[in-house]
Amino acid sequence: MSRVARGAARASKRIWRGTWVERDGMLWSPLLGALGLVAGFTTRAQGSLAGSRHPLEDQARNRAAVARTLGFAGIARAKQVHGRDVVRLDAPVEPWPVADALWTDRTGVLLAVAAADCVPVLVADPEGPIGAAHAGWQGTTLRVAEALVEAMVAGGAARGRLIASLGPAIGPCCYAIDMERAAIVNERIGEGSLRKVNDRIVMDLWAANTAQLRAVGVTRIEMSGVCTLSGGADLWSYRGRGPDGVYGTQLGFIGRRA
């Protein structure tokens, strides 16, 4: 292999770390944005958007406002259960289907997953389907990101063209887990995402999902590098909730305008 070819091969496997940017009160994926996609993560500035102790009517109004701001008629969502089921959504539907990943090949559809420490995994074929997955520790160990990619490929995406971006989530700086959870993680996906830091066991959700995306052929992966608990952005964090237990939830979103 020539030096040019080797350099191209290395570039095709590059991980862009800590590249997400804040603009207009939201966090944005530059890699997906460069494809003409609307892809990012809301912040506290938009209010709580799903699955928290805030009034449901307020969250519905907040979602409608976010959709308008982003240039879409509504938000296509699913009822998340920390699993690995994937659904195709070509428009917002009621009631929400039960799934933790969703995809579409239509323009004018804004897909979103709720997260307050879990990883929003955003995936796109520049010439085809787009998708989003919600990957907390359970979804990660059930390989929901892999399930999303396989569903997109079955739906017409070209595996070799797929690009992924991992949004803000609780980072390995802050995600300490107990021995029982660590044993489940190790049993399901191995110990590659676990490490010992002083007297704590921490899990790296970004590393685990990156490895899974690579395993199903995704070679261009961007990582936000923003920890929802300590990353400095104005974000809700389930682990960072106050003594009253109240917290909010963001949306990781991806769409292609019509």
Image (cartoon, rainbow, N blue to C red):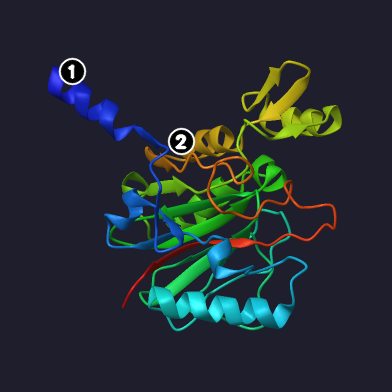
* Rendered image quadrant of residue 76: bottom right
- The Cα–Cα distance between marks 1 and 2, rounded to whole angstroms, is 22 Å
Mark 1, other Cα within 10 Å: few <14 / some 14–19 / many ≥20: few
Is residue 53 or residue 121 the one in the foreground?
53
- Asked if residue 2 can be seen in this view, the reply is no
Circles 1 and 2, Cβ within 8 Å, touching? The answer is no
Position above or below: 158 against 200 = below
To which residue does mark 2 refer? 214
SS state under label 2: helix
Which tag is nearer the camera, tag 1 or tag 2? 2
The vertical placement of 50 against 108, above or below, is above
Quarter of the figure that contains the N terminus: top left
Q: Quadrant of residue 138?
A: top right
Q: Is residue 162 left or right of residue 248?
A: left
Residue type, label 1: Met
Tell which of 25 and 35 is nearer to you. 25
Q: Which mark is residue 1?
A: 1
Q: Residue at x 52, y 62 (%)?
A: 42
Residue 197: percent from the left, percent from the top?
69, 18
User: In the figure, is residue 194 to the left or right of 53?
Assistant: left
Q: Is residue 225 visible?
A: yes
Residue 216, given in percent of the width and then of the height, sits at 47, 40
Toward the viewer: 205 or 126?
205
Which residue appears at 76% of the width and 22% of the height? Answer: 200
**Image location (x, y in percent) of residue 199:** 78, 17
Q: Residues within 10 Å of mark 2 (few under 14, many from 20)?
A: some
Residue at the spot x=85%, y=58% of the render? 244
What label does residue 221 carry, if any? Answer: none
